Every structure is written in C-alpha cells, then in structure tokens.
Image: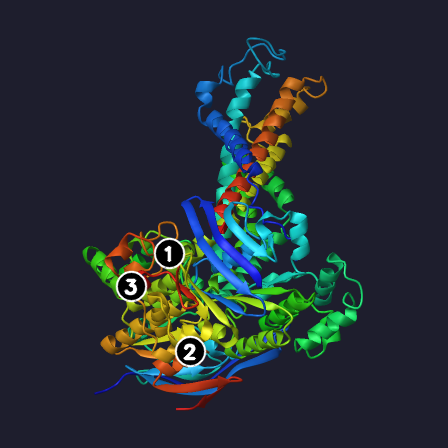
C-alpha cells in the first residue's frame, strides 16, 4: 500500500540581518529527512538550534533558503491549487508555547467553530463534532466560553491540539508540545496523541529537547546540532 | 531544631470570581541542614507558600496561621524586622531569571546593591567578593561580567546570578522557587549541580519548590507533596519514591517516563470550588465512600504523614 | 531583596473618575448636536436686534446680524462633532487598512505602502488644507474629506508596527497553517489584537480634525452655511466682537472647542485603560 510521506531534501535556512542585510546566520544546513504516515520521527536538540525553524519549514509556513519539501512525492512549491489545498489540510503544526497558539481575543468556542466552518462541517453537525473532540481530549464543555488567559497551560495546549485534530491531518509537526506542562498533563497528552496516531495513522514529527518523551514516542530519532542533522536510529 | 516551622497556614484571595483558598491548612517542618522539596503541579499553592514566608504576597491576600523561624513568627514581625531577615537570613530565588533581575542595572551593581542595603562592609561588601561569587557560579570572565546587563546573558547565566545573589550574604535558608522551570536539560543539570554544591558546603538549608519530581529526587532529603492547596503526603525522599502512600502520589509517579507516562484521569480541580470531601477523590481509583464527603486529616505513619482515609 | 514589602495591587484610585467626565462631556455635545433643533431656544438664522448683551431672553446675547449666540453655539456642536468624527473615521480606516496589510504581508507590499505613507508625510498638511479649502467649494463635508485623506499617516505607522509584531505570533502562524485565507486572518486574528492601539489614535485624530476645522473656519475658509464654532470666532473677530470685548461672543465657542477636545482625549485614555485592565490584571 502506498504510504504517504513528507520529505525534506537538502533544506538550508539562512537569516540575513544587519543594515544592510549583509550579515548571515546559518540556522539550518543540508537537512534531509522523511516521515511516513503512522510513524513518529523525533527531532532532538537544544534550544536555539533551529528546531523550530525546521518545524515551520516542514509545515510549509516558512520558506527555506535552499532545498525543497516534498509531500506525496511532489514539491510543495510546484503544487497546483487542489494539491496545495490537500497539502495545507494534511500537514499541521502545533507550537510549543501553549499561550501563543490561540488568539487571546477569541473564546475557545470561537476558535474552534471557525475551524469547523473552514473545513465545511454543516451547522447542525458542528456541536456534535465539537463535543466528540472535546471528549477525546478530556476537556469539559464549560471551557468553551473562556478565553486563553483563563485556561491553564495544559488546557490551552489541548485546545490548540483540538484545532489541528479537527482537520484529521496526515502529518502533525509538534514543536515542544509538552515541555512547559505539568507531569500529569504531559502524560495525558502523550497518551491521547499515541491513541490518535493508532486510530488515524497520523505521521508525527516530534521536536523536543525532552529525551524521555522522544524516546517514548518516536520510532526514529535525529539530533539537530549546529544546524545539521545527525541520525541515530 | 527546625529551620522553619509552618503551622496551619491558610492563604486566601478575594477575587472577582469569588474567594479562592490557595493554601489550605498547611503545616510543614523544615529541619536544619536538610533540603526540603515542596512538590506539586501548577496551581497547587506551592509558590504562594514560598512567598508567604517572606510576606511577598499582594495586598488582597488573607493570611492565617504561623510561620516560625528560630522561635519568631514571621507573620507577626514588623516590616522593618522582616526586611532585615529577607536576603540576609532567608533568601529567595525566583522563577524567570531574566525577569527577576533589574534590566537597567549592571549585574555588578545589583550584587553591590544587596551589600549596601544590608550595610555589609568589606570583605563581603566589596567588588572583589562580587567577582569571586560570579567566579564560583561559573562565569568565564567574572570581572567583565560585573559590568554587563542581564539582557546580555542567557537564561541559564542569569539564573546563576540569582543564585549568587541568594548565597552572597550566607543566609540560613534559601528558598528556590521553580529554579529549573523552562530550562534545557543541560542547564537544568548545571543548576542542580550548583545546588548540590551549596548543600555540600553546609552553609544554608534549601527549600526547593518545584513541579519537577526528578529534580527533587536529585537534591532533596525530604519531600512534601501538594494537591489543590493541601499537603497530601510528606516523608523522606527515598521512602517516597520507593513506596508512595497517597493515591495521587502513586498516580503521579506512574506518569513519569520511567513508569511509562501513565496518565491520571480527569483534570486538576478548580481552586474556587474544589471537590467536597477529599479533593482528589474524583480522580482516585481507590476511593472509599467516606472520601466523597469527608476531608481526610493528616495521618502519621512511621515518620511520614498522609492525608488519606486508606491509612486510618 | 530588602525593602520588598507586600506588593500593592494596582491603585484603584483614579479609575472611577476619569471615564465619567470624558463620557459625560462627549455625550453632552453629542446630544446637543443631535437635538439642536429642539434644544436651542431659537432658530440660529432668526434675526433679532444685533450686538445685544446677555440677557434673560438671549443668554449669550446676539451677534452682528442679530442671531442668538446660544442657539448658534448649540447648532455649532453638530457641525463640529460631525466634521471631527467624520474626518477621524475616514483617516483611521485608511490608516488601519494600510497598516494592517503592510504589517501582515511584509516584503514588497510593505515597501510600497510605506513609500506612499512617506510621501503623504512629506506633504505640508495645513498649507494644503488651506489651499484646497480656498479653491474648492467651502463645505464642511469637503473639509472633513480633505482632513480625513491627509491625517491617516501616523495611524498607519503605528498600526503597521503592531501588525508586524502580531503577525509573527504563533496563533497567526497556526491560522495560516490551518488554511484560513489571508484576509480572514487579518480581520479576525490580527485586527482584534491591535484595536487598543487604534482607539487612542482615533480619539486624537478627532481632536486634531476638530481643531483644524475650527482653524480653517477662523481663517474664513469654512462653510458659512453651517455655523461651526470656528466660524463664530471668525465672525466675532471680523465683525468687531474682539475689538469691543464682546466676550460672550468669542469665549463660549472657544471654550466649547477646548472642552470637546478634552472630552475626546479623556475618552480615549479611559478606553485604553479599560482594555488593559480587562486583559492585563492577572
């Protein structure tokens, strides 16, 4: 069976800064990796090594200076409209700072309803779909009318996950999803992500500096050091 | 003889949404020469306890109970007497190192300010001593570092500055509030090593506040576990990890990596309207009928205390 | 460490007073403007004896053509409020759109939009406004339009700056990743997070527009068919009010301008504070 893959080939990212833009900072150098549906690729490295940048490039929301990302065998830069929409829906990212993933001016309900509208769920089915997602994540309904700053870090992260999981993407790029969370909440999120992957065959790119978490979740691990990738398993 | 005796401390806040009891009838003994770890998850009240000791709470806090430091009740001292104790006898290291330092003062100035305020002259009050402190903390060029600003250093280095500030006046107690929060593995290890050094040099006793169980295991002698504003279990760290008593303690240890990240069902309760009876009962797998309506008192069991009816 | 006493909560002291004053004054002028026909004792165009001093019949006397000054004053609210608000709305909408798009799209669109902004910044506004007012039909609407078209630049810059910042935040990147359209993201994600910057700028623009209109009218370039406060001062000046120290003619309109601008600024200030307290007190 053809297994969909998300691939990076020779990705490099250079930031230019200074006035004029002549100074360069090489954040990523010659990165090549591949993830298949249903498996987890762990990317480890310390803060500031470019892990987050790699995550954003893989998700297609930041452009690499060199190299290309392939989704289902095709370069994402060359995708036609319908194919691009498929890519956009199926490759999602969840960020590390729980408070930053949600718009502080929108209630949880609004943030989630807008996604339901975007993916075309008809009005009458929306509250069902929403309830089911909240249950999957262990969130109670009275969170719906609250704003992000009224929720705990763990709840915020779960809502951010809900937004993404409503799309049922083929791939999820998780940038430090549990580093800022309490021990028990971390265990909850790992557990539910594991179950989700078993059910939906989602491919995870798990970016984290937490060694035990990556060991637990990942099938293969790569280490990012000084902008370069070193595979270990 | 104890360093610190916290007796029936209760801290409540009047907020727009109601009265929140952040700390409920907490009693703790911190023995001399030992490192006590106060462990718990976000919102359980541990940071509030740390601040109550030095009376650094906002004005809308209602505090009841007693906190004895060497026979004096800190909660009853005047502001003047308390300000002499702060920094000199009891020091505190806050979270978020870069935010805890004054961004417009050089590092050297902030250390010297400490001396000036506590009127300590040389040898302690000198620049040399400040430099030697930074040297101890692993700064590569301490003399140069004295003239730099916090924004020029990383979180890890700033955390070390905070530690330097805390040990500068050789206080009897150092309270460390989440010292490893948000830090990388490497930095965490470095900071914990610093604390081990402080322990070894037997100068001060450490009161560590953290949600990081593994950090507690590394440096603490005794542990007190908090849940929803109450202390639910205390005991020696080795005994705690070998055989936790309270169901929450057991579930928490199971959710550690070593045990396979087994999650605890349910969510942390709201502090505004906590569950009736035992606060952990909605999530407890071993609950009895009585747990639903009666709150368990602290029960002594061979040197440990636990708030659970299973041990009555 | 020493001297850190119990942390006081943010002072509740002045928060109660300020909004009421600002809101009160603003509403007063708003109501006067709306209900001028009903509130004013006389029709401002009706002629009585000229140059009358304040009396029971005419609380502020009459002007050189015998119009009741108090009625003129009340009708003047309408013109001033309309021109002030109208111009400010136009300027703010333009500045908002330019700033939002420039900050969100960055790159070439940003360069172009900021280039346009720079050009407008270089234009000497007051002389241009005077010239246009002098050559075009003297109408309050034209004045409002012209002011609106010229006063958007500082709003644009401030909005762009904040928009740049907000567009880098994770929730915006999340929305992009989820597949929302750029326009949707700009208006539902970025815009709500920059409103608190826009409101004070809007208020200040209202104040600036009002003063500009009053100045133009004072110079004689205003709309004589609409009795604004500026026109009243102009007439007082040119028809012998100042020379003869007929204070009841020129002081009330001047006072009204001052009070209205004051009200607008207070309102902007209190709205900004409310926004901050709603989000910031944690």
SS type, badge 1? loop
Image height of B173 relative to C226, above or below = below
Whether labels 1 and 2 belong to a single chain: the reply is no
Would residue C102 be visible to someone looking at this image?
no
Whether labels 1 and 3 belong to a single chain: the reply is yes
Task: Name the residue nearer the viewer: C165 or A195.
Answer: A195
Marks 1,2: beta carbons within 8 A = no
Whole-angstrom CA distance, mark 1 to mark 2, is 44 Å
- Determine the residue positioned at 66% across, 56% down: B85
- The image shows residue A201 at horizontal and vertical percentages of 25, 79
Q: Is residue A145 left or right of residue B79?
A: left
Image height of C117 relative to C141, above or below = below
- Determine the residue positioned at 27% across, 73% down: A196
Task: Name the residue nearer the viewer: B71 or B146.
Answer: B71
Q: Mark 2 highlights which residue? A: A207
If the image is split into quadrants, where does the N terminus of chain B sit?
bottom right
Disc 3: CA contacts within 10 A as few (<14), some (14-19) or many (>=20): some
SS type, badge 2? strand
The chosen color scheme is rainbow
Q: Which mark is residue B297?
A: 1
Instruction: Give the mark toward the camera: 1 or 3.
Output: 1
Chain where mark 1 sits: B
Q: Which mark is residue B284?
A: 3
Asked where in the image residue A74 lies, by quadrant, the reply is bottom left
Chain where mark 3 sits: B
């Amino acid at each position: 069976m053809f297994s969909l893959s998300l691939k990076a080939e020779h990705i490099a990212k250079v930031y230019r800064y200074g006035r004029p833009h002549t100074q360069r900072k090489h954040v990523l150098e010659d990165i090549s990796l591949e993830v298949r549906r249903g498996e987890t690729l762990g990317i480890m490295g310390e803060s500031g090594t470019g892990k987050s940048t790699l995550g954003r490039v893989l998700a297609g929301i930041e452009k690499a200076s060199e190299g290309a990302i392939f989704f289902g065998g095709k370069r994402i830069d060359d995708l036609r409209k319908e194919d691009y929409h498929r890519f956009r829906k199926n490759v999602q990212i969840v960020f590390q700072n729980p408070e930053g993933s949600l718009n502080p001016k929108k209630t949880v309900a609004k943030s989630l309803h807008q996604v339901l509208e975007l993916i075309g769920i008809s009005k009458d089915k929306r509250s069902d779909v929403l309830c089911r997602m909240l249950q999957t994540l262990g969130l109670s309904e009275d969170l719906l009318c609250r704003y992000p700053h009224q929720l705990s870090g763990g709840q915020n992260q779960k809502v951010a996950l809900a937004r993404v999981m409503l799309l049922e993407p083929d791939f999820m790029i998780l940038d430090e999803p549990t580093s800022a969370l309490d021990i028990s909440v971390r265990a909850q999120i790992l557990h539910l992500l594991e179950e989700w992957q078993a059910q939906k065959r989602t491919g995870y790119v798990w970016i984290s500096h937490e060694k035990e978490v990556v060991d637990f979740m990942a099938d293969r691990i790569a280490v990012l050091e000084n902008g370069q990738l070193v595979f270990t398993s | 003889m104890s360093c610190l005796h916290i007796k029936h401390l209760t801290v409540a806040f009047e907020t727009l949404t109601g009265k929140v009891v952040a700390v409920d009838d907490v009693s703790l003994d911190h023995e001399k020469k030992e490192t006590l770890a106060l462990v718990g998850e976000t919102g359980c009240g541990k940071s509030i306890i740390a601040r109550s000791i030095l009376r650094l709470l906002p004005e809308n806090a209602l505090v009841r109970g007693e906190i004895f430091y060497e026979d004096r009740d800190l909660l009853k001292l005047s502001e003047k007497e308390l300000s002499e104790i702060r920094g000199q006898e009891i020091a505190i290291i806050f979270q978020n190192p870069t935010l805890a330092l004054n961004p417009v003062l050089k590092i050297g100035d902030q250390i010297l300010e400490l001396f000036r305020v506590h009127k300590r002259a040389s040898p302690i009050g000198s620049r040399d001593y400040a430099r030697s402190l930074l040297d101890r903390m692993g700064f590569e060029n301490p003399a140069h570092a004295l003239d730099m600003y916090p924004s020029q250093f990383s979180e890890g280095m700033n955390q070390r500055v905070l530690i330097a500030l805390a040990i500068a006046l050789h206080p009897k107690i150092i309270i460390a509030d989440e010292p490893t929060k948000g830090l990388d593995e490497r930095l965490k290890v470095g900071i914990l090593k610093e604390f081990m050094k402080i322990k070894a040099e037997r100068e001060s006793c450490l009161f560590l506040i953290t949600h990081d169980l593994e950090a507690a295991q590394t440096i603490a002698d005794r542990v007190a576990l908090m849940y929803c504003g109450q202390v639910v279990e205390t005991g020696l760290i080795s005994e705690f990890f070998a055989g936790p008593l309270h169901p929450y303690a057991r579930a928490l240890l199971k959710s550690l990596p070593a045990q396979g990240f087994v999650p605890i069902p349910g969510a942390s309760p709201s502090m505004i309207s906590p569950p009736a009876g035992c606060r952990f009962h909605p999530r407890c797998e071993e609950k009895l009928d009585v747990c639903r309506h009666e709150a368990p008192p602290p029960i002594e069991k061979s040197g440990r205390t636990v708030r659970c009816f299973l041990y009555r | 460490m020493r001297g850190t006493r119990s942390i006081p909560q943010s002072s509740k002291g002045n928060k109660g007073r300020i909004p009421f004053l600002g809101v009160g004054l603003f509403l007063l002028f708003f109501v006067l403007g709306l209900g001028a026909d009903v509130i004013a004792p006389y029709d401002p165009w009706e002629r009585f004896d000229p140059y009358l001093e304040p009396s029971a019949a005419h609380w502020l006397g009459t002007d050189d053509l015998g119009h009741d000054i108090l009625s003129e004053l009340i009708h003047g609210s309408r013109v001033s409020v309309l021109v002030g608000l109208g111009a400010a709305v136009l300027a703010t909408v333009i500045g908002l759109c330019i700033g939002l798009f420039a900050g969100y799209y960055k790159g070439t669109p940003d360069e172009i939009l900021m280039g346009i902004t720079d050009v407008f910044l270089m234009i000497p506004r007051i002389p241009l406004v005077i010239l246009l007012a002098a050559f075009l039909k003297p109408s309050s609407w034209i004045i409002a339009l012209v002011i609106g078209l010229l006063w958007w630049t500082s709003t644009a810059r401030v909005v762009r700056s904040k928009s740049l910042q907000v567009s880098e935040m994770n929730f915006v990147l999340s929305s992009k990743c989820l597949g929302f359209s750029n326009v949707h993201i700009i208006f539902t994600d970025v815009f709500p997070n920059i409103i608190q910057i826009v409101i004070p700028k809007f208020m200040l623009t209202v104040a600036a527009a009002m003063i500009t209109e009053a100045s133009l009218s004072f110079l004689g370039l205003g709309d004589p068919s609409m009795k604004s406060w500026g026109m009243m001062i102009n007439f007082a000046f040119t028809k012998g009010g100042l020379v003869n120290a007929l204070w009841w003619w020129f002081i009330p309109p001047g006072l009204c301008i001052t009070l209205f601008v004051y009200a607008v600024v207070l309102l902007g200030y209190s709205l900004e504070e409310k926004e901050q307290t709603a989000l910031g007190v944690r």
